[in-house]
Amino acid sequence: MSHLLREHAPITQEGWKTIDEEARERMLPGLAGRRLVDFSGPRGWEHSATNLGRVEDVDVSPVKGLEANRRVVLPLVELRARFTVSREELRAGDRGAEDIDFDALDVAAQSIVEAENLAVFHSWPKGGIAGIGERSPHSAIKSGGGVEKYPEHVARAVELLLRKGIAGPYGLALGREEYTRVVESAEHGGYPLLDHLRKILEGPIVWAPGVKGAVVLSMRGGDFSFESGQDLSVGYESHDSDVVTLYLEESFSFRVLTPEAAVPISPLKS
Amino acid sequence: MGFDQYHEPPEELPEETRTFARLCASLTEEAEAIGWYEQRLAVERDPEARAVMADAVGEEFKHFSMDLEFLLRRKPKWREIAQGVLFQDGDIVEHGEAAEAAAGDSDSTEDPSSQSPAFAGSLGIGSLKEGR
């Protein structure tokens, strides 16, 4: 039996299918890191650390003539977001209802998405994750002049990467505000800003809730590594006569292998 | 158009089983292609033609590996046995027997969410990078 204890939930097979599909649909659009960085795994719930290939000295001074090292590893972090589902709603689903209330699941899904993006694109110090923005040695490009200046900012970021020998294609992760303003904007002559940016990047532009500002990064591979232990899953916690308490869960580590392969852009002023 | 990968009436098979069968057929085709290129390379003397075929067989290696990984993700018991056999030094048969014994009697046709630690309850999202 898996640690998710799904077998103990008072949920039918069809009910689980509906919950899993809802969770998947709610998270897919916002999982920006997985669209832009290398992904490995899933390696399972038991997988606890990423091998870094490095060691640190261990003091064994009481014993003469010995050298000792301790392996340095990157522990995986766990994310968990609880939510409840009404048993009445689940029963309605079993009878074929197509408008089941999954509001709490949607909130949990967005929390997980934002936390994953924060870890990847910024940092999660207490989780031991130094994300892309924190590791980048490049100063953030100032996004002055409004969204119409975005092609200039992105082109400058791409040129900076090229100058450092970082090949493309390049991807662009846009925070909520930046994404909205880019998508709704057209340049002189009505040419969509989004299309112009795509031409500069030669790669995808992704909606990245949780990201503050934007990040331009190389997608050539080998620069950013997301290692999944338990991939995003739904587990069972408890139930009473009215509601079932479930949770979304994942474990992962994230490493920046080439800090100079990404350039942050500061948030747009509102 | 034939549907040779099915041995049971397709309309009676669940969608997951039809997908699994398609990937099994694809795996077989990639293995056949690798075998064909091996034979062609063994007899071809033109270095330019050999270079083209050597490049092409690399594609088949990739396709075969991707098909296999997909199938192993869907069949925990198969994956467990494969983990005991693949990329190991030593006696292949011994590893195979040991891996099969270690995998025990678990029913590989069960929902993977009830068996594999890696995929138990997993939403199967993984990488969303284009081209993956």
Image (cartoon, rainbow, N blue to C red):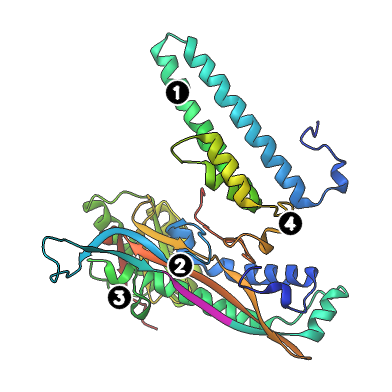
Q: Secondary structure at mark 4?
A: loop
3 and 4 marks in contact (CB < 8 Å): no
Q: Main secondary structure of the magenta part?
A: strand
Q: Are marks 3 and 2 on the same chain?
A: yes
| In the displayed structure image, the side of residue A19 where residue A77 appears, left or right | left
Reading the image, the residue beneath label 3 is A144
Inspect this view and state whether residue A181 appears.
no
- Please, is residue A63 above or below residue B100 in the view? below
Q: Position of residue B94 (x, y in %)?
A: 54, 38
Reading the image, the residue beneath label 2 is A252
Q: Amino acid at mark 1?
A: Ala
**Foreground: disc 4 or disc 1:** 4
| In the displayed structure image, the side of residue A7 where residue A52 appears, left or right | left
Give neighbour class at mark 3: few <14, some 14-19, many 20+ (Cα, 10 Å).
Answer: some
Q: Position of residue B13 (x, y in %)?
A: 83, 48
Reading the image, the residue beneath label 4 is B110
At a point 75% along the width and 90% down the height, the residue shown is: A240
Q: Is residue A80 magenta?
A: yes
Q: Position of residue A161 (x, y in %)?
A: 27, 56
Q: Position of residue A267 (x, y in %)?
A: 36, 77
Q: Secondary structure at mark 1?
A: helix
* Pointer 4 chain: B
Q: Amino acid at mark 4?
A: Glu
Give the position of the N terminus of chain B as an image quadrant.
top right
At a point 64% along the width and 67% down the height, the residue shown is: B121
**Foreground: disc 3 or disc 1:** 1
Give the distance between the C-alpha atoms of the residues marked 3 and 1, in whole angstroms.
52 Å
At a point 47% along the width and 64% down the height, the residue shown is: A47
Q: Amino acid at mark 2?
A: Phe
Reading the image, the residue beneath label 1 is B54
Q: Which residues are magenta?
A: A76-81
